[in-house]
Image: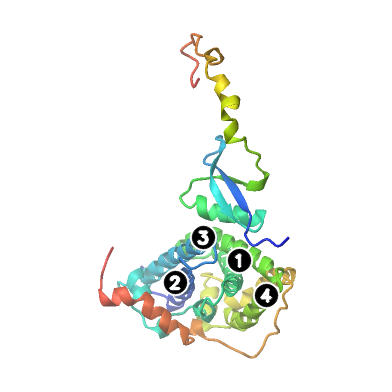
Amino acid sequence: MERKEWPLWEVFVRSRNGLDHKHCGSVHAPDAKLALQVARDVYTRRQEGVSIWVVQADHIVASDPDAKPELFDPAEDKIYRHPTFYQLPDEVNHM
Amino acid sequence: MTTPNPAHIEYLTRLGDNALILGQRMSEWCGHAPVLEEDMALANMSLDLIGQARMLLAHAGQLEGKGRDEDQLAFLRTEMHYRNLTLCELPNADFGRTMVRNFLFANFQVLLWERLLASSDSELAAIAAKSIKEARYHAQHAGDWVVRLGDGTAESHERTQAALDYLWPYTAEFFAANPSDEAAAAAGFGPAWSELEAAWESVVVPVLTEATLTVPARTPFKSFGKFGRHSEHLGHLLSEMQYMQRTYPGAQW
């Protein structure tokens, strides 16, 4: 199959050591190595990152937007799953 | 301050003009590159080079001690006072030629910066430390493209080989002996460029081979940009680059 368009790659950037990679956009590139390079040029021009992941968009398996009610709504009334009923000692930060 | 050393000023001017003229030339791609991603990459690299040119020309102006700043040096000299390599002023032509040129030049610049890290001039050594990272990225970026285009489709191979055949003769100028070079080298200011030829070929040739390109044989052709004798292309580039400063002298923004 002849491919007229370069594949799409999703770009994830880690802004600082210790933080997670966050999705920040996508680029077109002919292969993985160039995808990293163009991601660097497009998304880290203003010191936004210290590490980049790229994933070919075809390889991402996404949930079906139409399945939102059965996937996510059932969690709505289960507030007991949130750990908000405990008294935390003051020494415990960042919860 | 010690008396200005003309060899050092000339050395800095050559480094600065290479960066300035190639930066200006590459910036012509802004808004015209084949894809948005490369448009940004080329503009980023142009800005890297123009940033290097600012530092180098500002330093040259300081050493010269005549009160010329980087803007005056960049915008108010005439053609014969520019000391850039002819290769840097040649037209971009297609994306393939732009990548081959960047590849040939960036690898040369990497070797220069590596040696200039140990320059006897501490300011030049500091400029080298900042610029070498940029040059390494430019070399990587262009090298990756040269391999993909050279070893790509029949058309991309043909165009890339044509670009290499066109540009290769101009690379002889990188290494041409130059009296001010020898003086600067003797003082530990920077390497004589003629010393870098073997190292450059040992980096460049394997990549060209990987790209399935044929490295042209050396010919008697010579170019003289770094001696101030330029191709017909520099004048056109300067007339565009200098337009604003010449029309509104001293303009700031």
Instruction: Please give the name of the residue rendered at 37% of the width and 73% of the height, measured from the top-left corner.
Output: B74
- Point out the image quarter for the C terminus of chain B: bottom left
Residue at image point 58% right, 76% down: B193
In the picture, the disc for residue B24 is: 2
Residue occupying the far bottom of the picture? B220
From the image, state whether disc 2 or disc 3 is nearer to you.
Answer: 3
Residue ID for mark 3: B36
Q: Position of residue B209 (x, y in %)?
A: 74, 71
Q: CA distance from mark 1 to mark 2?
A: 17 Å
How far apart marks 1 and 4 lie (CA) works out to: 18 Å
Earlier sequence position, callout 4 versus callout 3? 3
Position of the N terminus of chain B, as image quadrant, is: bottom left
Task: For marks 3 and 1, give the one nearer the viewer.
Answer: 3
CA separation in Å, label 4 and label 2: 28 Å
Say which label, 3 or 1, has the lower sequence index: 3
Q: Could you tell me which secondary element the residue under label 4 belongs to? A: helix
Could you tell me how far apart the alpha carbons at marks 4 and 3 are, in whole angstroms?
A: 22 Å
Chain under disc 4: B
Residue type, numbered disc 3? Leu
Check the image and report above or below for B94 versus B229: above
Residue on which disc 4 sits: B155
Q: Residue B178's quadrant in the figure?
A: bottom right
SS under mark 3: helix
**Labels 1 and 4 touching (C-beta < 8 A):** no
What residue would you read off at disc 1?
Answer: B142
Q: Is residue B232 left or right of residue B185?
A: left
Q: Disc 4 marks which amino acid?
A: Glu
Q: Amino acid at mark 2?
A: Gln
Dot 3, crowdedness within 10 Å: few (<14), some or many (≥20)? some
- Please name the amino acid that badge 1 sits on: Ala
